[in-house]
Image: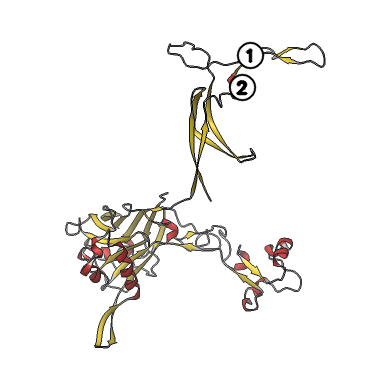
Amino acid sequence: MHPEWGFFIYNSEVFINNSQNISGSHSENYKGVPPGYLSLYEINNDRPSTIDKNIFPFVESNSNYKTRFRKDLNNLVNTRKSGSSTWSSALTTINNQDVIAGNYRMSASITRQFLTTSVKTVQGPFGSISLNVNHTSSTLKNTAVQYQTINPSFKGSDLDAMFTGSINMINVPSIFYGSEIKKGTVELNYYITGTLIATAKDELENGQLFCTFGTASVSGSIVGHVLYREGIVLFPSSSSPSSTSLHASNIKHAGASSAADNPKWIYFGAGANDGITHDTTHTSASYDINFEGTTYKNTMTMFCHANKGELNYSNNPTFKTIEHSSSIVGFSTSSFTYSDKEVQIKNIASSSFYKGEDEFRKVTYISKVGVYDENDNLLMTVDLARPYKKEEDDDLTFKIKYDLL
């Protein structure tokens, strides 16, 4: 499966799939998570922030916990047995193993990090060595090596230079894309005052982000890279196209106290949960991230056979020719004898002639398939996309896929 996702970033706020961040009575987002975040469970919607007012998982110390949990349901509605401490105090005495509680307000959203390196002097066996150090950048470099087979930018000196300078990184949690981001679906759009100034896509499906729309000096160049399995989009400062101006506007991308600069790919996504509070100049900039995920689902394939000479009878009333003008009861000779009239099967065999009637043949239309166990118990029914015609000399096989939970 390939779910589609879209993130719109404007004025330090993230919008998922063009959905508004609606505030609630008890929180700034009615789903109980920060605005721009996806709620994992969505069960504590618009509830107070205190844990005793929310649904939450817990484990309570008791020698007969399973029996007590089933019998004492008052524990689920904030009513404790006599002699027990209250919820508020119990939740703070975890060391005494009275109650261990969790939190269902789990959430995820995209985040932006601007990684900078600093020079560190390391003493080695042959003297001191100066190194550009950033732990996150070093981790990204090791990860990028795995993509050398498809991305030629991650080889040799280009790889070394890429991770020695500053890097603009967009991190997408796996809850959005599943196993990996689908290759060839990443599209990034850069807007100034609502006008599109640049677009980048991974058209070659190899992780390289080409600027497909923008200024002449940047268009057609590689401005960034995608790590599909890790859900990371990065723009290295060592790549001159990512540090090239895209527009003449001066914007304070790093916050109100920073210096203003022209829009560049190295600033893309500024405000995406990166802790930056922007001034009025940055409100003119907005960013759009679109991609498809890849999710694998286990399925069971079944083949259901409708053999020749079988399944050519139906209990559907339209299968028979029945006149409703009188009862189908034939006669009754006594109170112990009963007989019905003979009812003919309707002939729906098609003819080669217009409004003609062909010789009688049993014809049925299969619209559902039943799946039974070894004891002939009906487990499930499958609705077909359309009824399939079956005559006595037909041999049909239906291929059914069942998604396993």
Q: Nearer the viewer, residue 315 or 97?
A: 315
Helix, strand or loop for disc 2: helix
Res. 307 mark: none
**Residue 319 in sight:** yes
Establish if 317 lies above or below 353: below
Q: Quadrant of residue 223?
A: bottom left
Where residue 257 sits in the image (x, y, percent)?
A: 32, 74
Number of other residues with Cα within 10 Å of mark 1, as a class: few under 14, some 14 to 19, many 20 or more: few
Q: Residues within 10 Å of mark 2 (few under 14, many from 20)?
A: few
User: Does 397 appear above or below 243?
Assistant: above
SS category of the residue bearing label 1: loop
Outermost residue to the left: 217
| Residue kind at label 1, given as amino acid type | Glu
Earlier sequence position, callout 2 versus callout 1: 2
247 w.r.t. 113: above or below = above
Point 58% across, 20% down: residue:
319
Q: Is residue 157 left or right of residue 329?
A: left
Q: Is residue 281 visible?
A: no
Image quarter of residue 256: bottom left
Front position in the image: 308 or 328: 308
Q: Are marks 2 and 1 in contact (CB under 8 Å)?
A: no
The image shows residue 204 at horizontal and vertical percentages of 26, 53
Which residue is at the front of the view, 175 or 342?
A: 342
Residue at mark 2 to residue at mark 1: CA–CA distance: 11 Å
Q: What residue do we see at 26% from left, 73% from top?
A: 164
Q: Which residue is mark 2?
A: 317
Q: Amino acid at mark 2?
A: Pro
Give above or below for 307 relative to 199: above
Q: Residue at x 22, y 56 (%)?
A: 214
Q: Which residue is mark 1?
A: 323
Location of residue 255 by image quarter: bottom left
What is the x, y in percent for residue 89? Answer: 66, 75
